[in-house]
Image (spheres, rainbow, N blue to C red):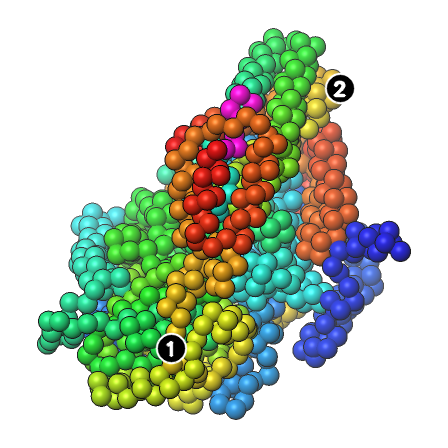
Amino acid sequence: MSEITSSAPAMDVGDSSRFYVLEHHPENSTLLGFWLYLMSDCLVFACLFAAYAVLGRNYAGGPSGAELFELPVVALNTALLLFSSITYGFAMLEMQHQQRTKTLIWLAITGLLGACFIGLELTEFIHLIHDGAGPQRSGFLTAFFTLVGTHGLHVSFGIIWLITLMFQLGRHGFTPENTRRLMCLSMFWHFLDVVWIGVFTFVYLMGVLP
Amino acid sequence: MPEQINLAKLIFGRLTWDAIPLHEPILLLTFAMVAFGGVTVLGALTYFKLWTPLWRDWITSIDHKRIGIMYIVLGLVMMLRGFADALMMRAQQAMAFGDSTGFLPPHHYDQVFTAHGVIMIFFVAMPLVNGLMNYVVPLQIGARDVSFPFLNNLSFWFTAFGSFLVMASLFVGEFARTGWLAYPPLAGILASPDVGVDYYIWSLQIAGVGTLLSGVNLIATIIKMRAPGMTMMKMPVFVWTALCTNVLIVAAFPVLTAVLAMLSMDRTLGTNFFTSDMGGNAMMYVNLIWIWGHPEVYILVLPAFGVFSEVVPTFCNKRIFGYTSMVYASVVITILAYLVWLHHFFTMGSGASVNSFFGITTMIISIPTGAKIFNWLFTMYRGRIRFELPMMWTIAFMITFVIGGMTGVLLAVPPADFVVHNSLFLIAHFHNVIIGGVVFGMFAGINFWFPKAFGYKLDTFWGKCSFWFWVIGFYAAFMPLYVLGLMGVTRRLSHFDDPSLQIWFIIAAFGAFLILLGIGSFVIQLIVSFKNREALRDTTGDPWGGRSLEWSTSSPPPDYNFAFTPHVHNRDAWTDMKNNKFVRPITGFVKIHMPKNTPAGFIIAAFSFAVGFALIWQMWLLATIGFVAMIAVIIIHTFNYNRDYYISADDVVRTENARTYLLNSHV
Amino acid sequence: MKFSASSTPTFRSALLCLSPILLAGCSTVVLNPSGDIALQQGRLLLISTMLMLLIIVPVIALICVFSWKYRQSNTEARYDPEWDHSTSLELIIWGAPLLIIIVLGLLTWIGTHTLDPYRKLDRLDAARPIPLNTKALRVEVVALDWKWLFIYPDLNIATVNELAAPVDVPIVFTITASTVMNSFSIPALAGQIYAMPGMQTKLNAVINRAGVYDGFSANYSGAGFSDMKFKFHGMDQTAFNQWVQTVKAEKMLDSQGYVQLEKPSIRVPVIHFGSVDANLYHTILNRCVGGNAMCMDQMMMVDAQSNKRTSSVANITTKAIRFAEIDNAICTTTPSLVKVNNNARAN
């Protein structure tokens, strides 16, 4: 290590030291960053809700929500999704206790509940399309399929992410990265829950009211 | 054989050899020039053995400084394309009177004006603005990089591949003929069954994702990675405007994503978002696209305002006047940007009360904007002004932008708008504010921070040539358009009957020619500066007498920016350090934690290009495979936990000693 | 370290930008129109400009003065590097524009309501109110690809690419389009308003001077857009009546004729129609010309009925069959069958 002595006049170097720190570790931005992304995603859903608000009564002479929606199925789906949020919460609790196996079990249950939700929703969609009430039939159905379908797509991607995380958890355990990722997925999953509450309120429940 | 035909359709979709425009001479000429230029560049890269450094040091780089430079290079290259479109439009409109139909048939002309708008906004202004913020913000807050360096690289490549998709439309297929915002029903499948609108949709979707991610990145960076002691109210104003800009990005771009997705669903799946017959509503598109569109123009101009807030105090040797006021004005502009969107379609028949509301909110937004102009003015007051190039651009901006702002307020009065909406008066207004604001701001910023990025100043003579050609050219090109608008001429016309209009169009074409000289002078400026770089060398890192932290580093800064993270006590942190006779530490360096370069961003974005191209041409197989591959790469990338490394203390010592030597040998 | 001083920007830029305002006074239709609504709109434009210039001119002047006075080589000017705040100045900076915007805002609110295109005219021009018992001239406007169809329902005539109206008679335009968005614009007469398929906009205007004026579409609509022009003739009442008689001599416009007309065409010459199917505009607006589709207003009535029903059906197959029946009916129905369908759906 060679040093080149400065030829500048000697200054009060003690003063200069207050203008820098020797070591600096900036705070981790992952959770904030993911939250910001999630809010942008929220805006996408807001646009889809807005489209539904505008087009939601344009049946083009075709079937309305009242004639199409089967509320018992919707109730079951809602229960599945809400329970999956609870089970994810349990997974997070086990994570805080550093219980890898228990975390993985609760994650698996969450994933299964999510998969059932998607399965039921797909069945509903297929029935509708089979009945001639597909997304091309009217503005109402376009907005319906897009809003509910986008939510379903998000849940599907969440499940893929969950499976990936389960592998990574199995391989590396509770590293800081994995912990952050689990917290991000947690935010994502609960967010989708909240969106679903909006969906079943504004689309399904209000759709069957006169 | 039925099976073979289906296979061909599955693989090639609607892509056939007819998609290549062999019958269009202008396009063939363009292709020849691009091919020639491309071969030259590729040949030079090979000859000078630059492929490895290009890949290792630039394409896979996650360094915010390199990514910033790449953004700006992308923006400047696309400016040449967008400006070529402008020249063609001006030439056509100057010629096409009476019997003459000019040289561009409507089918071609309509693509030119659409492409001009799309390219200038999305692939010139956005990359330039993003590039500047990327380069400067981490340095100004005393950080070593942004919060998510890999995401930064990914964002850049998404933007770049979006622009490649637009360029591809020149040679394979065609571009949209709808205007830059592609209103349905014209952009719907019935009126535009060809691939043009699909090119539009997918290039913007891909670039839009990149921009959104970069918005998230910069907000997190500014919130979390400021140097110790730099409270929010001690940040440079450029950082404040960058924060506001990125908040606008995160809050506006999802709307663009959603509305373009809706349009593509209407076109591809036959849904009814915007159709006229089955319960759709085309007015909803207009609302949604402008809910994005208006914040977008503030996304473009706020960073320019930030640049001026740095340039004026530096070249007036004086603190910025009314710092708190500037901050509040920026935040107020950010919020109000969401309350004005309907002024873009007063004429759609929303009713007087709704129109008045939005007209008044539009006028209110001029108040904080005006406050900023006054604050710069009073920074100049009792200062000592040096008219270096950045300051010249700033003065030109101040005069030009207030005129554009004035015509904006005129347009904000709905009944006045009824007579000039969509006329050349409108075109003159928005070019007035975008060129006067954003372009002049970018040139000020480029001239200001170029020495920091590359270690030498830009040549002054050619810079001044560029400046005068641009300023005079702008006025010559757009003042006639105000007159034409008042004469009742509407926009997007490819030919005219009234010969009394022609003189104005000729003046405008001449103005465009002057701007061409301005761009040419800028290119010469770059070349001449490179050749004379030793004479123009910046040895101290602070060629202008700067006030913020980036000027405390060497020019260019080392990879790690700061050997020791600064500790901030006041606004204008570097001036504060200089006033307190700060002496740069020359010993005691430690190892520095840095993120690694990665090819993942480039690869993911390349797949997105393939998916976009495949969706445009309805090559469903390729689209599916490409999409699955993209997801696979993303997932595989998450299995890589080994993303960082340490710069050893020895390397830091070496770099810092080299700087010490440079500083001492030029005292 | 030396910083080289460069030249200061001159007043040239300032002059260049003021000149259009001076030049614009001469023969621009926006500032010198022939219709009362357009006149008031142009006047608003001028007043707003004057109000804005109250700020803009001093600002540009100050920019030039400060650039000159405080240039580095002028060492006599006072140099105050620490001066960065002044409450009174801030009050003026925020307050003066605010006052101007308040005035402009008031003008905007009043002007926008007075000049609302949907609002019936209350005067012929600044000097004259509308005489009692004046019957407004109704014109139905359809923007086609790429020409304009004008139907005069009270006179039972129609024209393509030619519009005429008597001077000093209020005109009420109802406007729609066939395929894509256009904008109905006659700058000399009044401001523009969009023409949109399946929707109707309205414009109230009056022409005060006889003459031939330009009309066009002010919203880009495709390949023939640049030729989508027409002439608007303002005439005295006698000349107008004569014009109507000329048009009445021509053939009828029925739905078949309209379907032909609707096909894309560019640079269409003026066509006159001596009579018009009374229901034609209604079917154009409701997108059911020729009876091949359910009219939009009926569709909306059906939808409104749907809204009143609650969910009742359990059997999926029955639903499917019934929906198929309804769709069949919708595509070929005539108005009288709608009631039959409603009853079927209720069972």
Residue nearest the viewer, comparing B273 with C153: C153
As drawn, is A117 to the left or to the right of B12? left
Q: What's the residue at 43%, 58% (across, down)?
A: C286
Residue at mark 2: A171
The verdict on residue C131 being magenta is no
Residue contact at pointers 1 and 2, CB within 8 angstroms: no
Distance (Cα) linking label 1 and label 2: 83 Å
Question: What SS does tag 1 mark?
Answer: strand
Residue nearest the viewer, comparing B427 with B202: B202
Residue nearest the viewer, comparing C59 with C129: C129
Select label 1 or label 2 by which is in front.
1
How many marks are shown on the rendered structure?
2
Q: What's the residue at 54%, 54% (across, down)?
A: C332
Q: Quadrant of the C terminus of chain B?
A: bottom right
Q: Quadrant of the N terminus of chain B?
A: bottom right
Picture coordinates of residue B649, whole percent (x, y): 68, 33
Mark 1 Cα-neighbour bin, 10 Å: few <14, some 14–19, many ≥20: many
Asked which quadrant contains residue C276, the reply is bottom left
What amino acid does circle 1 point to? Ser
Which residues lie in the magenta part?
A67-73
From where the camera sits, is residue A158 visible? no
From where the camera sits, is residue C248 visible? yes
Picture coordinates of residue A208, whole percent (x, y): 44, 30
Picture coordinates of residue C218, whole percent (x, y): 41, 71
Residue at mark 1: C275
Question: What SS does tag 2 mark?
Answer: helix
Chain holding disc 1: C
